[in-house]
Image (cartoon, grey):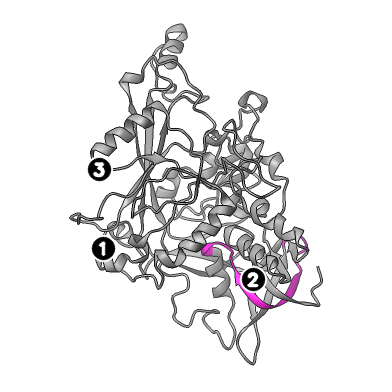
């Protein structure tokens, strides 16, 4: 890397946004420097999607001394969650899902990267590609119910764009990702350019038929997983035999989209991309005469030295909270409150999503059914929003959806709770193995100025940067879908 030159653009962050920025700019002949705070690892060796549980010394679980924060800990304790814990390594709740050992080098260690403030489950992955290496694969389009929410229900502000404006770009992105799904023609959930969808299981088909009678839809899971293949030598199409349902995420044949194989490696093939990992941006530098960005100051995480990268354009794509943190850290005479923050809104109006409430049911008609091969899919079904569309629900605005699945898995659902012992226990587990169906709800958090993150005035990370601080939960009802 030549830091004496001025690049056409420097991009901070290599996840979905940073990878796309680097890919598009280099394809147009621009010279781009991509800075990633984390390391580059052999992601295929980490994920090992085809490894059987019995081939792992702990059936996929992390070693002793490692701990994934549980949901109750987020509820009861205050950040930083790894403080004063006896565990050597602490990870976000995602590390507590099945196959936690496969993500121990992907998720950040909360002991090394603490944050302060009010209660919040912040999932971070500091490596090339960021969380695209382990994302949940659900790929949905926003609609005008999202872009024009104020017009629909009077709360907040409308986006300055509509679905019609962004649809052509959705179409372009679909060709990069490869979206498996089924056309439903729903105004609240626009269809993508779908590839072959994964078939619903017996219980999922029954749910779809039942919901149809209620005017609702259970559609096959819309996944950013190519089933027909894409024009990319670094990715393979899905053959439905991996560990999708048994791991926090990730795919070592890269049928599931990830930024490195989907965007960054093709960008590097152009010869126009320079990649520097272990580079922690701590300030967007500005021209003292114009106040415009002129580059980025960053710290090498290995030698702790500070460097400057010069560029005509700076693109900040370091995740929602880390991008806000970097803007707030970038104070100067022209930008005393942080660059881009003359309105005082940087870090505010933070919109999470509500997740967690769910249910599991037993489909009695399927007890004793002959087993079928239902494992290896990226997801089961998705029930899109059905509230506050044509009707107006009393007490809340906007809506929520459900993700779920049913069918036979490598580890039968309900086995933990099945009664009995020995032969009778095994018989009960086998008979009920494909008869359970589960779903979990996901709701919208309304944008409020009082819901925000800022910089901790006293606590700093190991590289001397002020830590991010989560602030302002307020009324728990107003934090969800209530006005």
Q: Nearer the viewer, mark 2 or mark 1?
A: 1
Screen quadrant of the N terminus: bottom right
Whichever of callouts 3 and 2 sits on the residue coming sooner in the sequence is 3
Residue 430 appears left or right of 260: left
Image position of 43 with respect to 116: above or below: above
Foreground residue among 313 and 195 = 195
Residue 116 appears left or right of 311: left
Real-space CA distance between mark 3 and mark 1, rounded to the nearest whole angstrom: 26 Å
Report helix, strand or loop for mark 1: loop
What segment carries the magenta color? Answer: 301-321
Instruction: Give the residue number, with chain letter if any, for mark 3.
Output: 215
The answer to which quarter of the image holds residue 376 is top right
Q: Residue at x 60, y 40 (%)?
A: 66
Q: Residue at x 25, y 68 (%)?
A: 154
Q: Is residue 127 visible?
A: no
Real-space CA distance between mark 3 and mark 2, rounded to the nearest whole angstrom: 51 Å
Instruction: Give the residue number, with chain letter if any, for mark 2.
Output: 282
Report helix, strand or loop for mark 3: loop
């Amino acid at each position: 890397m030549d830091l004496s030159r001025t690049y056409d653009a420097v991009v901070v962050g290599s996840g979905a946004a940073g990878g796309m920025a680097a890919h598009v700019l280099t394809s147009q002949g621009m010279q781009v420097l991509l800075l990633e705070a984390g390391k580059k690892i052999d992601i295929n060796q980490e994920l090992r999607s085809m490894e059987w549980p019995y081939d792992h010394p702990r059936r996929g679980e992390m070693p002793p001394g490692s701990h994934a924060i549980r949901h109750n800990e987020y509820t009861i304790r205050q950040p930083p969650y790894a403080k004063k814990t006896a565990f050597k390594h602490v990870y976000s709740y995602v590390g507590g899902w099945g196959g936690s050992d496969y993500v121990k080098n992907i998720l950040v260690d909360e002991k090394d990267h603490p944050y302060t403030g009010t209660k919040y489950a912040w999932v971070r992955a500091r490596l090339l590609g960021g969380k695209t290496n382990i994302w949940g694969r659900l790929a949905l389009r926003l609609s005008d119910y999202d872009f024009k929410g104020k017009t629909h229900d009077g709360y907040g502000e409308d986006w300055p764009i509509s679905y019609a404006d962004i649809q052509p770009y959705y179409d372009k992105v679909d060709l990069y990702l490869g979206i498996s799904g089924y056309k439903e023609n729903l105004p609240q959930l626009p269809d993508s350019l779908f590839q072959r969808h994964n078939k619903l299981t017996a219980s999922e088909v029954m749910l779809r038929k039942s919901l149809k009678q209620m005017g609702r839809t259970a559609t096959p899971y819309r996944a950013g997983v190519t089933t027909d293949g894409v024009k990319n030598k670094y990715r393979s199409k899905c053959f439905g035999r991996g560990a999708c349902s048994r791991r926090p995420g990730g795919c070592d044949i890269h049928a599931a989209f990830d930024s490195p194989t989907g965007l960054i490696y093709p960008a590097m093939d152009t010869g126009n991309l320079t990649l520097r990992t272990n580079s922690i941006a701590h300030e967007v530098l500005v021209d003292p005469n114009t106040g415009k960005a002129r580059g980025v100051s960053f710290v090498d995480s290995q030698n702790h030295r500070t460097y400057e990268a010069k560029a005509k354009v700076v693109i900040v794509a370091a995740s929602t909270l880390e991008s806000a943190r970097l803007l707030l850290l970038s104070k100067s005479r022209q930008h005393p409150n942080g660059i881009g923050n003359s309105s005082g809104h940087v870090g505010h109006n933070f919109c999470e999503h509500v997740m967690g409430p769910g249910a599991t049911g037993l489909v009695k008609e399927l007890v004793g059914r002959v087993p079928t091969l239902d494992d290896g899919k990226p997801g089961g079904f998705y029930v899109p929003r059905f509230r506050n569309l044509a009707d107006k629900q009393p007490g809340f605005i906007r809506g929520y959806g459900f993700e779920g699945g049913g069918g036979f898995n490598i580890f039968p659902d309900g086995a933990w709770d099945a009664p009995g012992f020995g032969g009778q226990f095994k018989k009960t587990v086998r008979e009920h193995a494909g008869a359970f169906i589960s779903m979990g709800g996901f709701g919208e958090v309304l944008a409020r100025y009082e819901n925000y993150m800022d910089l901790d005035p006293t606590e700093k990370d190991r590289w001397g940067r002020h830590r991010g601080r989560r602030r302002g939960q307020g009324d728990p009802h107003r934090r969800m879908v209530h006005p």
